[in-house]
Image (cartoon, rainbow, N blue to C red):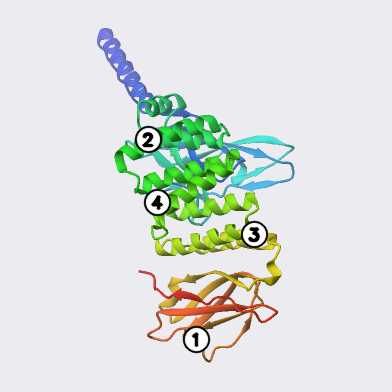
Amino acid sequence: MNNILRCFALSFTFIASMAITSFISAQTTIDNPIVAGTNSEYITISQITTSSDKTVFKMELTCYEGLEYTLHEKGSIHAFKMVIKDKSYPLLGITEAKAGVVECKMMSVQYFNLVFEALPENTEIITLQEGERGDSDLFFDNILLSTLETTTAKAKAGDSKYQKFLAKHYEQQYDYESAQEYLNMYIDQIVKKEGTQSKGYLDALGSQIQLNLNVGNYVEAEELSLQTIEAVGLENPEVANILYTLGDVYQVLGKHEDAVENYIQYLRTMEKGENLKSATYSMVNNLVMYSWASMTDTLDRQPLAVGVAVNPLKIEEGTAQMRIYAVGATEYMVSHKENFKGSKWNSYEPALMTEEKLKSNTKTLYVRFKDNKNRLSTPFAIKIEAEE
């Protein structure tokens, strides 16, 4: 009997040890995962641990005395979420932080964990986003679930995805020499696979131009931008980001009129690609105003219409709700007619929100601006399209 019990005990121990071993083997820990984009200089991901039932992010927050950072618990519209191939995975909980709040005492580093559902099998890339504020509020975009050692080996073996990640990673680390090395590898691979008219190639050239701008190679950034725009043409919406970066280059060089021209052209090109957002207009408006204010002959210029962002959801209700952007303007006019017949002037304030009642056949509205010397801007056409 004792032998039977001893045998059973040994068998149970073996099975239990196998179960523990199986659980441990199903758990993966990635230290210092590779991040290709972030909008936070103060929050970093030091470790990601994945298992069959959950995914845990170990986060580090650089704190400054007197500040408070709210992490938001599950259920809040501002809760963190993990995004994988456009599918969201909600936050299950926050640990090592009192009631979702980190209080900063002196200058210090605070630690907390974000716990999510388990990652789908074979996941390589994830995004960490804040709640339901939209794509502009990404904390970490494109997190590679791999160590630096593994990523480097795959990049040097010719994997373009890993080359692109490392180029972005080293640029964020201000190691521009390494960033350039991997960016060159990536561009070579893209040319071989997709050619010189592909979106991937243009994105890579955009990164090359931005890198030149970051390291102070302004002439090279300008020349590469102009060559690319000439080769691809303004009709291709994929050239938009290069126009935007060229505007930044001209701003740094003090060529403010050229900067304004490129920012405006950026908006026009984005419209052709049907991917323009209100935030884009607002951001570019600020850049245009900066360049405009830096011009020496601003007083001799007519008002400039930067653009109009339309809320497509209101169109079905028979209303065009618009945020209009201009510089050098004191009044504006909106009309259903290109000749503005019967329309009246209204006071303009920066980034003004206005509404216009639509007729059943309205396809286009027109807006123009006037300054305090009664000088008129060039009319601006607004396409009216409902949300699909």
Q: Is residue 107 above or below residue 279?
A: above
4 or 3: tag closer to the N-terminus: 4
Front tag of 4 and 3: 4
Which secondary structure lies at badge 1? loop
Question: Where is residue 216 drawn, in percent x and y?
Answer: 61, 40
Label 2 SS = helix
Q: CA distance from mark 3 to mark 1?
A: 30 Å
Of mark 2 and mark 3, the one earlier in the sequence is 2
Three-letter amino acid code at the position of disc 1: Asn
Q: Going from the N terminus, do you reach mark 2 or mark 1 first?
A: 2
Nearer the observer: mark 4 or 1; the answer is 4
Task: Tell me which numbered mark, 4 or 2, is placed earlier along the sequence.
Answer: 2
Badge 3 amino acid: Ser
Between marks 4 and 3, how big is the CA–CA gap? Answer: 27 Å
Q: Is residue 98 above or below residue 46?
A: below
Marks 2 and 3 sit apart, C-alpha to C-alpha, by: 36 Å
Q: Quadrant of residue 333?
A: bottom right
Dot 4 surroundings within 10 Å: few (below 14), some, or many (20 or more)? few
Disc 1 marks which residue? 339
* Residue under numbered circle 4: 231
Indicate the secondary structure of the residue bearing disc 4. helix
Residue 131 position, x and y percent, is: 50, 53
48 or 279: nearer the viewer: 279
Residue type at mark 2 is: Asp
Of pointers 4 and 1, the one earlier in the residue sequence = 4
Q: Amino acid at mark 4?
A: Ala
The circle on residue 291 is 3
**Image quadrant in which the N terminus is located:** top left
Pointer 1 local density, CA inside 10 Å: few below 14, some 14–19, many at least 20 = few
- Checking the image for residue 188, the label placed there is 2
**Could you classify mark 3 by the number of other residues whose Cα lies within 10 Å: few (under 14), some (14-19), or many (20 or more)?**
many
